[in-house]
Amino acid sequence: MKTDVAILAGGCFWGVQELIRKLNGVVSTEVGYTGGRNDNPTYQHHPGHAEAVKVVYSPDKLSYRKLLEYFFSIHNPTTILRQGNDVGSSYRSAIFFTTEEQKQQANQLIP
């Protein structure tokens, strides 16, 4: 089975993971930190990193665009450095694309 990878940040990674992992076409998910200033971020030390979910999915069952549309429906990408009660740069909304095609598709969806 062919799979692709998406990396999405939209608040608390456990909440985002719980919602995304249930989508038809998602093969696996993993939470972690990305986009920051140190190589081995931890809960106690993750300067500049966002809480993110790595999503492995089958593009035959779930397109990247549909995944992003769902991602935008489960969080508010317009709030600055927060989602709900979670406040700070770790909870920012971000898309960490892994291919140029993902970048183009994300840019098409973001006004």
Image (tube, rainbow, N blue to C red):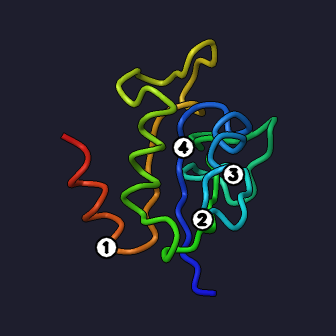
Q: Which residue is mark 2?
A: 25
Q: Are marks 1 and 3 in contact (CB under 8 Å)?
A: no
In the image, what residue type sits under mark 4?
Ala
Q: Is residue 77 left or right of residue 17?
A: left
- Tell me the CA gap for discs 3 and 2: 9 Å
Q: Any mark on residue 83, and which?
A: none
In the image, what residue type sits under mark 2?
Gly
Give the percent coordinates (x, y) of residue 65.
Answer: 36, 58
Q: Any mark on residue 21, and which?
A: 3
- Tell me the CA gap for discs 1 and 4: 19 Å
Earlier sequence position, callout 4 versus callout 2: 4
Q: Any mark on residue 101, and which?
A: 1
Q: Which residue is mark 4?
A: 9
Give the percent coordinates (x, y) of residue 58.
Answer: 57, 74
Give the percent coordinates (x, y) of residue 76.
Answer: 43, 26
Vertically, is 84 above or below 33?
above
- Tell me the CA gap for discs 4 and 3: 14 Å
Image depth: mark 1 or mark 2 in front: 2
Image depth: mark 1 or mark 3 in front: 3
- Where disc 4 sits, the SS reads strand
- Where disc 1 sits, the SS reads helix
Vertically, is 4 above or below 29?
below
Image depth: mark 4 or mark 3 in front: 3
Earlier sequence position, callout 1 versus callout 4: 4
Q: Is residue 56 left or right of residue 31?
A: left
